[in-house]
Amino acid sequence: MKWASQRHIRIAVKGTGHDLNGRSSGAYSISIWTRNFNTIEHNASWSLLNGEKENVLVVGSGTVWGDLYGAAAEQGRVVVGGGDATVGLGGFIQGGGHGPLTSTYGLATHQVLQATVITTEGRILVANDGQNQDLFWAVRGGGAGQYGVITEYVLKTHPPTELVTIGTLQIAPPTDSGNLSTNATWDAAATLLSSIPDLMDSGLAGVTILATGRRAMSLYPSLKEPPSGVVMNQMFFGYNVTPAAMALLVDPVITHIRSHSNKSTLAITWAEPARYQNFTSFFKAISGTSNAAGGGGLMSTRLLGRAELSELSQHNLANFLQRALRAQNESDGTYAFIGLQGGPGPARVSESRWGSVNPAYRSAYIHFISMGAPIDLTTAGGPKEGLAAAADWLEKNKEALFREWAPNTGAYINEANPFNSHWKQDFYGVHYEKLLEIKRTYDPSESLYVLNGVGSDQWDYDLDSGKLCQIL
């Protein structure tokens, strides 16, 4: 190995947003602060190469989604962005970018019509359908901060929703059921998830939370003790869907779940759906507000489609869910967060707008995030050893599971296990080699390094010393 020279220094590109893999924190690196790239301009008739006109926002890459949602609303439009107002555009879009409107319009990167990129050699390039097409393809889904520093995007906007409905379904064991409801709750979870593809094809989106052990008690406070099964909280979104129409879609699922249980094994609550008159009021109701800059654990994630949900037997699906919710400390339990952020939206995106996003997203309906690997920072070997131990546990208990459950899909690169041993295939799919060629063209000095980024396997990064070492 060869220690990196100063020209091979690691660079992290930062806005105000955050990255669940820690890439935006840029430990032991020089950070390029993009927050001041925050201009927002509206153009109702931006010209495409073929002469067609699009209603767009021309925005700086350091803008955060909360500001962009507000600017779009002022023009009577909506944009496809993140579920937290404080997330920045830059890396979010380059990794794909999913959020509340993804199931309708596709990923955030599918809305990009042009990008302005500064390369590590100091060139300022405009990338679109007519120029620097290879770079344009790469920055639309091929991973954040790897090909150049993006300073500006041109993003397609969409007509506003006239009505948004939110409905909440909660399923748990009765407070006095003891261990009797273990199988019933896992079967109910399997029934619920197997119904998701049909519900999404009918116009619903949303978020699912599954919890076990003491974590379940925080989700469902009326429980008197940690349940032996799982607690579920399902929030459905419906755009231009009335509360009555949502109920018609969800009621058969509830009936199916009830038919396989009784009052002694399950407590099922379907709250009266709430109406919101526009996307702005809806987003305020669902948006995260945390400003936390980091966390103390790792997670494993997978994109799952109809084959992994609706076409499995209930027994097999329930078994996979139990394994996905395994925690290192079973008494404490763990969470799974499931975004209904695939389905019709990505499936309808044309090839010309797809970019380099992992093709697994075309058939995915949900993004499954499995928590459960806390990092012991007090271990004898220090943070590096603690991180390695957590990564090893995830590899054996979660990544292996997902390869069995969904061997032909992948993971959403912005929210994944950065220590996944199959990262090339899972994060980039069939596009990896082409992305590597493009990176070497626009970043020949390999100055832009991120963990499990394209070409990063040619480098070794030591967390303790901060040295970046080239492998020869």
Image (tube, grey):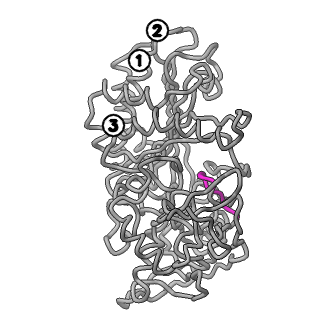
Q: Is residue 236 above or below residue 453?
A: above
Q: Which residue is mark 2?
A: 180
Segment tinted magenta in the rendering = 16-22
Q: Is residue 182 left or right of residue 62?
A: left
Q: Where 444 sits versus 449, above or below?
A: below
Badge 2: residue crowd in 10 Å (few <14, some 14–19, many ≥20): some
What residue sits right under mark 1 in the picture?
184
Q: Label 2: state its secondary structure.
A: loop
Give the SS element for disc 3. helix
Query: Crowding at label 1, few (<14), some or many (≥20) Cα neighbours within 10 Å?
Result: many
Which residue is located at x 41 percent, y 49 percent?
422
In the image, what residue type sits under mark 2?
Leu
Residue 445's x, y, as percent?
A: 55, 77
Give the residue pinned by disc 3.
404
Viewer-side residue, 458 vs 399: 458
- Determine which quarter of the picture holds residue 28: bottom right
